[in-house]
Image: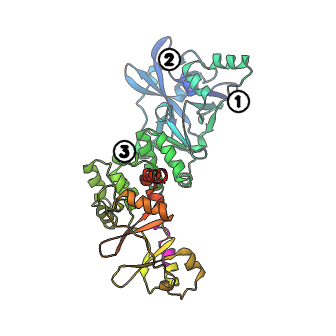
């Protein structure tokens, strides 16, 4: 039988397992002549488990591709050197059809959406059947790292002396998806269903993103929908959110900012390079961009810089039915639904109707009959200290911000402003 009729899987065992670390770096020879070394493993795209198509050989001719069917030796047991032929070394296949295991997987970070944590891929496991070889698992455990370093065998011996087990931590390829298609070779994440990232608590997703390197953060945000990305960025420090947005595509960054409360978006954009921030805003819808630019006019550390312009307001002669319809229509857009701000004919604040009273009243009841006329408010130019004092003293959920004519221009929410105001709360506690 000739060499080109001897596939790599020609062997008596029904199957065998091999790791990428055991294959990388092995010599390729032809009748004792060195042709090169295994630089990477080439897997075909598609299918539940990627099939090993061949190896990337680094040689004096550069990187060349050696199809798996042109190797003389089976993968297991591994020879000291693979036997091949120089005439079988061909150009590398198209990246659209294949990917390089080491380049795409090894040392890359993966996102465990169930554990809300980040792990590193230390190795990749293959199974060789009598006819084909497939990538089946990635190894994220200590054993994979020790195998890469060449210390696995002595480490297992030492563990045995102390009656300990050096277990493997393998993750099935079925639960792994690369993000390279959208953003170049980047992180990989567990669970193919994108929706799993969306159902994570924003705080957990933010923690995951913070653990990634910058390129991987950008890749992950490009992989989720704008609303999910916005929820995560809102949980981060503005400086970190700004760093990520600066490296994103401006249009994608704009989509995310449109989903973020305008006051938070202003905080983030204030940390972005001015030229880059202007470019991002150019890709935003006119309404959201105008809202942000209006808030940017307020001085730092004032009520105006803390407020959001997203709140629920109705004329004072509206009914409970009108209010409930407004809540239903705006529930996805407005975070604060506990209060309805009632306006008189001059658009000035008349009173505030609480959600509890709305639920208990009949649909035809006038809101003016339910509203509290004793309203507490602040001016846009009032200091953080003044806002914190009001929250602390009256135990409020939100404070309306009124202009000189008494019109509601925004609302400061306790939850959103807490991080900025917490030093002032501390002063309040220590001074009393």
Most foreground residue, 261 or 40: 261
Most foreground residue, 315 or 114: 315
Q: Quadrant of residue 160?
A: top right
Q: Is residue 117 above or below residue 249?
A: above
Tell me where the magenta segment starts and ends, as one range.
325-335
Across and down, in percent, residue 383 comes to 35, 59
Is there CB contact under 8 Å for labels 3 and 2? no
Residue found at the far top of this picture: 32
Say which residue label 3 marks: 243
**Which residue shows up at 43% across the image and 58% down it?**
388
> What's the CA distance linking mark 3 and mark 2?
43 Å
Name the front one of labels 3 and 2: 3
Task: Look at the numbered disc 1 and give the secondary structure of its residue.
Answer: loop
Query: Visible in this render: residue 11?
Result: yes
> What's the CA distance linking mark 3 and mark 1?
52 Å
Say which residue label 2 marks: 27
Considering only order in the chain, which callout, 1 or 2, is on the residue closer to the N terminus? 1
What number is the disc on residue 14? 1
Query: Visible in this render: residue 260?
Result: no
> What's the CA distance linking mark 2 and mark 1?
26 Å
Is residue 164 shown left or right of residue 391? right
Q: Is residue 48 above or below residue 73?
A: below
């Amino acid at each position: 039988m000739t060499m080109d009729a001897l596939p790599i899987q020609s062997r008596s065992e029904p199957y065998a397992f091999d790791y990428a670390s055991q294959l990388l770096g092995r010599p390729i020879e032809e009748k004792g002549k060195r042709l090169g070394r295994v630089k990477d493993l080439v897997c075909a795209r598609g299918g539940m488990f990627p099939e090993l198509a061949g190896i990337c050989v680094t040689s004096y001719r550069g990187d060349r591709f050696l199809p798996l069917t042109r190797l003389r030796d089976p993968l297991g047991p591994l020879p000291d050197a693979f036997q091949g032929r120089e005439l079988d070394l061909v150009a590398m296949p198209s990246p659209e059809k294949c990917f390089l295991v080491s380049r795409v997987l090894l040392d890359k970070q993966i996102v465990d959406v169930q554990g809300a944590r980040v792990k590193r891929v230390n190795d990749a496991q293959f199974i060789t059947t009598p006819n084909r070889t497939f990538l089946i698992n990635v190894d994220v455990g200590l054993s994979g790292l020790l195998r890469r370093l060449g210390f696995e065998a002595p480490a297992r011996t030492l563990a045995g002396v102390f009656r300990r087990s050096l277990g493997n931590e393998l993750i099935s390829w079925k639960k792994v998806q690369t993000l390279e298609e959208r953003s170049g070779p980047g992180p990989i994440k567990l669970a193919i269903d994108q929706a799993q990232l969306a159902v994570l608590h924003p705080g957990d997703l933010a923690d995951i993103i913070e653990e990634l390197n910058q390129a991987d953060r950008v890749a992950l945000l490009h992989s989720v929908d704008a609303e999910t990305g916005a929820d995560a960025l809102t949980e981060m420090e503005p400086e970190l959110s700004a760093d990520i947005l600066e490296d994103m595509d401006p249009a994608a960054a704009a989509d995310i900012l449109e989903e973020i409360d305008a006051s938070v978006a202003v905080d983030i954009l204030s940390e972005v390079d001015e030229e880059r921030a202007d470019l991002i805003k150019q890709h935003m819808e006119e309404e959201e961009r105008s809202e942000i630019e209006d808030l940017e006019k307020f001085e730092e550390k004032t009520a105006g810089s803390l407020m959001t312009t997203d709140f629920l307001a109705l004329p004072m002669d509206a009914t409970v039915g009108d209010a409930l319809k407004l809540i239903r229509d705006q529930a996805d857009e407005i975070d604060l639904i506990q209060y309805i701000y009632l306006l008189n004919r001059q658009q000035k604040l008349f009173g505030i109707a609480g959600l509890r009273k709305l639920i208990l009243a009949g649909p035809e009841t006038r809101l003016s009959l339910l509203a509290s006329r004793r309203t507490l408010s602040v001016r846009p130019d009032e200091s953080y200290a003044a806002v914190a004092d009001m929250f602390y003293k009256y135990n409020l959920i939100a404070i309306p911000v009124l202009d000189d004519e008494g019109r509601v221009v925004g609302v400061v929410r306790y939850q959103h402003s807490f991080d900025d105001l917490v030093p002032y709360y501390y002063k309040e506690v220590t001074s009393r």
